[in-house]
Amino acid sequence: MPGFEWEDLEPCVEWMAPFARTHMDEGSVEVKFFQSINAEDSHNIQIHAVDLNMLVRGYSCFIAFSTLMF
């Protein structure tokens, strides 16, 4: 099975990078453990904290980056 070429992935990477950077800038979230959840299943719990402000910041970065490229 052939792999992807950079030209296939570039549009996705360019679109996702500002949102990923915004998420990274928020910092890590402490992993939570619950007595009622088996430790082996703790990876199923979503511990990230996202809100619309993060989306707006990510989109603003995307727009700023896009205007620099064109």
Image (spheres, helix red, strand yellow):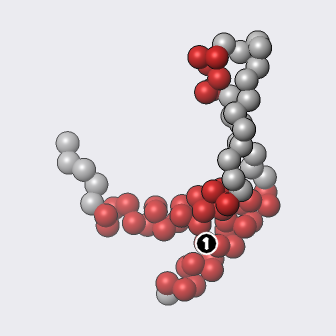
**Residue 30, position in %: x, y?**
72, 38
Q: Amino acid at mark 1?
A: Phe
Q: Secondary structure at mark 1?
A: helix
- The quadrant in which the N terminus is found is top left
Task: Decide if residue 19 is in sight here.
Answer: no
Residue 43, given in percent of the width and then of the height, sits at 61, 27
Residue 18 is situated, as x and y percent measured from the top left of the image, at: 59, 66
Which residue is identified by label 1?
A: 62
Residue located 77% across and 14% down the image: 35
Q: Residue at x 61, y 72 (%)?
A: 62
Q: Is residue 36 visible?
A: yes
- Quadrant of residue 44 in the image? top right
Q: Is residue 19 left or right of residue 35?
A: left
Q: Quadrant of residue 39?
A: top right
Q: Position of residue 60 (x, y in %)?
A: 69, 73
The residue located at (32%, 67%) in the rendering is: 7
